[in-house]
Amino acid sequence: MALDSYVTLGRSGLRVSPFCLGAMTFGDGDGLGSGVADSERILRTYLDRGGNFVDTANFYTNGHSEKILGDFFAGQPGLRDRLVLATKFFGNLHPGDPNGGGAGRKAIIDQLDQSLRRLRTDYVDLYWLHNHDWTTPVEETLRTLDDLVTAGKIRYVGFSNTPAWFTAQAHTIALLRGWTPVTALQLEYSLLERTIEGELIPLALDTGMAVLPWSPLRNGFLSGKYTRHGGRPGDVRRAAAVGTPSEAEYDVIDTLAQVAEEAGASSAAVALAWLRTRPAVTSILVGPRRLDHLEDNLAGLEVTLTPAQIAALDQVSAPTLNYPAELNGRVGQMLMYAGATVDGEKTEVYPPLLNGDRY
């Protein structure tokens, strides 16, 4: 697979690359990101390889990320319209202003206007709600976003980091009222963070929403730079910011390294290849700070894992899901199918049925 092997974003007609370039690290104001020159090299390499999907947010590096992208596209006439450009609203860039962020009508419209100014464009293709605003009626948020679609300022709507119940409620209201529905979900998902499999992944599968995992390497823990016996990145400031893996996480990291050795690939490439096999995942966000990071990530498009390798990674990283997910899955099949084979899968018998009388 290559970056120009495009995939459809959920139930929309939008075609995107299987890896999306995340620009969260564009702009080096905190010393942990990429300067303008490095950001542009990363962006150019991604585009030259056939990538067409770029993601940012209004508050990434205090707006500098959006400005870097806008300046780059302004210097490449005609390029912006050939790309799928996404940004997010919610983050407040105006200390002391209660309406500077969130998902109210005033906040959304102002945040979009400022993002369009920095991006030097008159529309964004995909506009994400970046977090759950529990103080704003969902109808206000949805109607505002629908108005912006009608006005041609945004094309599609996505939600990021929102609870499953809220996302389902919003999507249902939008469909019932004829407003723009939720097309995609941007969620943390990796071998070290799989709890979205309890409710958010089933929601996405049921509604046809695309899932875009962020932090697919879990802050670099799955990059191959961390080992149980002391190996860790040389960037002391970044290591201090993200911490170190736990013993349970090292179990996953060790298995990942073993599979990577079998596959003749890096741990990062295998972690990304595993994510590509997950249900509902459409495009994976990669956020390189250096050009070599991008190259290492893109190698994940070239790795094909065997069923045994996928099973090994599945098993070692199996999450503990919130009630009632585990009960519905394990006990539910026993109670419902009572040992029958359904859809090719043999189920267990609820134990009391084996020896008890039926009345």
Image (cartoon, helix red, strand yellow):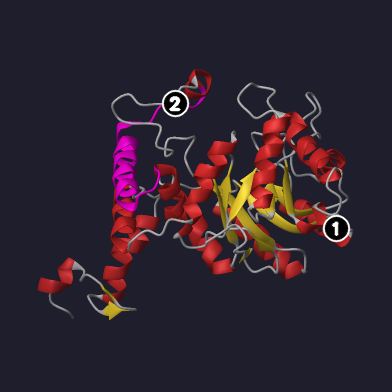
263 left or right of 285 in image: left
Identify the amino acid type marked 1. Answer: Asp
203 left or right of 352 in image: right
- In the rendering, at what x and y percent does residue 237 appear? 52, 19
Q: Secondary structure at mark 2?
A: loop
Which of 179 and 186 lies nearest the eye of the viewer?
Answer: 186
Query: Which quarter of the rendering shows the C terminus?
Result: bottom left
- In the rendering, at what x and y percent does residue 287 appear? 59, 40
Q: Secondary structure at mark 1?
A: helix
As drawn, the label of residue 147 is 1
First to last magenta residue range: 241-266
Give above or below for 11 relative to 229. below
Q: Nearer the viewer, mark 1 or mark 2?
A: 2
Q: Quadrant of residue 355?
A: bottom left
Residue at image coords 80%, 53%: 79
Q: Quadrant of residue 179?
A: bottom right
Which of 217 and 342 lies nearest the eye of the viewer?
Answer: 217
Q: Give the Cα separation between the discs numbered 1 and 2.
A: 46 Å
Q: Is residue 23 visible?
A: no
Does the segment drawn in magenta span residue 177?
no
As drawn, the label of residue 233 is 2
Identify the amino acid type marked 2. Answer: Pro
314 left or right of 103 in image: left
Which of 348 and 20 lies nearest the eye of the viewer?
Answer: 20
Does the segment drawn in magenta span residue 254?
yes
